[in-house]
Amino acid sequence: MKMSSAFPSIDLQGTVVGSHISELMRYAEVQGRVVLLALFISLCTVLPVGFNMVVLNVPEQIIQTAINDSFHSTHGIVLGTSGLNIIWSILVASQSIGALIGCVLVIPLDRHFGAKSSLLAAASICLMIGSLSMAVAQWLTFPIALLFGRILSGIHTGLVCAFVPLFIQEGSLSCSIHIGVCVGTALAALLSLPFMLGSANTWGLLLLFPAVFGVAALTSSFFVPDTPNRLLQQGAYTQAAHSIRFYYDIDVDDVEDAIKEYWKLVPETPQQIPVSTALGNPAIARGILLGGIVSATQIFSGSMATVSYSTTMFTSVSFFEGLIPFLPALGSIISIILTLPSLQLVESYGRRPLLLKTLALCLISDVLFLIFSLLAVNPEDWWASWLFGLTFLLYGVGYNLGTGPVAYFLAAELVPPEAATASLGVAVAVNWASSSLTTFLFYPLNQSIGGWSYILFIIPSAIFLVILWRFLPETRQQYAQRPTENASFCEIAPMPYGTFEEGLLAEQLTKF
């Protein structure tokens, strides 16, 4: 039986930077329309995810002051430092909490509206309402709207992270999701500078900005047809043929011939099994467990904390104050640059050695963060703050060359092909649960105990490193040997309705 993902997917296995760029260009020439659609939809959906991850970083003090002033003017309450720290950590963590809610909503949305409408319409509406709500928080001096908007933007994040990896399917180009997030963080870091939109009078506009991408995605949903997968499942063969012509630019008038041409482009992949069935097999359960650990490792290495709280981290070590607002933008640009060679390293160097060595580099960086943070408390040890900055760069190298990008697709490679969606579902849930926990705990810990707060990352990373060094197999060869007959650059393949939903999300993500 031929099956595939719920909507247009792009199989770019092997098309990475360097010697593979010509192959990518060849694919683009052959199926340029669907390539442009994939890039456009990825831009409009993934970029806001990264934007909202870092947007509160630079204007932290300005927004905290606005929150405090609002509580004082409305309720006559002046928030203490500890209370404000807790409120701020909840606001930052609420995006991850919303992402978990978004994962729960994937099944009903996909069942009633389909993947295209869920991604381009439902997720975009959440993004637009959430962005508007956060802007209203400034315009009406209403902090609760800020929390509500962050949760809605998190729901958008969860929906996007569930659907877009199916659109850009398999192989190391899944790292393009990581690049899209980095571009979003860079844009947020630049626009949140005080002389841009990060001032006391304009931070509402800053938080409203992602709605632009939501409007673009929602508008495109009226022009992009539903996918052949969903239409064929519904028995709407005439509409399915029209959809095939749209996505593949196939010049065939006859419905039956169009569907036959479509089948020639469909890769042959096995039917996906539900999570309960996968966990009932000890070998598959072990792979799912390792995939969850890899996903947790990505977060507990300190990634979300460095993205969300980098200005706080540098302020706590008395770094040069004039440079601190520019550091998130610089870090995001470096992340994009470092991720590009990781596309080649993943294929040439191997998943296991790349992950283990870069994770070790992240662990060393966390230890150095702790040491230099404690030393920087003494004004005479001014050099410690600059060494802290170099350590931040070292961490960026380790994370963006391996620990970050590899985690996006390794979970699917640790299990047989029929259990890939189950493994990815568990990994996504673990990732957002870990993000919620670390972003909620790190900020108040860092404000109260300083450098000792990095133990939150050191201990888990050390444990995960030992476990992965002992049990993680190399998956590059196994993945390369998986059957790819009839594989195409873009495929829109039918799959029995409910296989993806019931297997991946109904039994696992709804538990959260």
Image (cartoon, grey):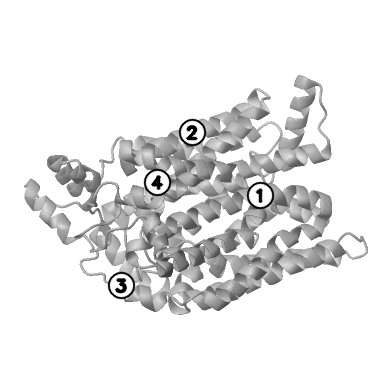
Return the mark for residue 128: 2
Residue at position x 60%, y 52% in the image: 435
Q: Is tag 1's residue or tag 2's residue first in the polypeptide sequence?
A: 2
**Residue 25 occupies which quadrant of the picture?**
bottom left
User: Measured along the vertical axis of the image, is residue 162 above or below residue 460?
Assistant: above
**Which residue type carries mark 1?**
Thr
Q: Is residue 282 above or below residue 246?
A: below
Mark 2 to mark 4: distance in Å?
Answer: 27 Å
Give the mark nearest the N terminus, 2 or 4. Answer: 2
Looking at marks 2 and 3 on the same chain, the residue that comes earlier in the sequence is marked by 2
How far, Cα to Cα, is label 3 from label 4? 27 Å
Q: Quadrant of residue 316?
A: bottom right
Q: Kindly state the secondary structure of the residue where label 4 is placed.
A: helix
Using the rendered image of the protein, determine whether residue 160 is visible from the camera's viewpoint: yes
Q: Secondary structure at mark 3?
A: loop
Mark 1 or 2: in front is 1
Report the Cα–Cα distance between label 4 and label 1: 27 Å
Dot 1: few (<14), some (14–19), or many (≥20) neighbours within 10 Å? many
Lower sequence index among marks 4 and 1: 1
Q: Residue at x 17, y 48 (%)?
A: 245
- Residue under pointer 1: 439
Please tell me whether mark 4 or mark 1 is closer to you in this view. Answer: 4
The amino acid pointed to by label 3 is: Arg
Residue position marked by numbered label 4 in the rendering: 506
The dot on residue 482 is: 3
Tag 1 near tag 2, CB within 8 Å: no
Image quarter of the N terminus: bottom left
Disc on the earlier residue, 1 or 3: 1
Give the label, 3 or 4, closer to the camera: 4
Q: Residue at x 54, y 34 (%)?
A: 131
Mark 1–mark 3 distance (CA, rounded to whole Å): 38 Å
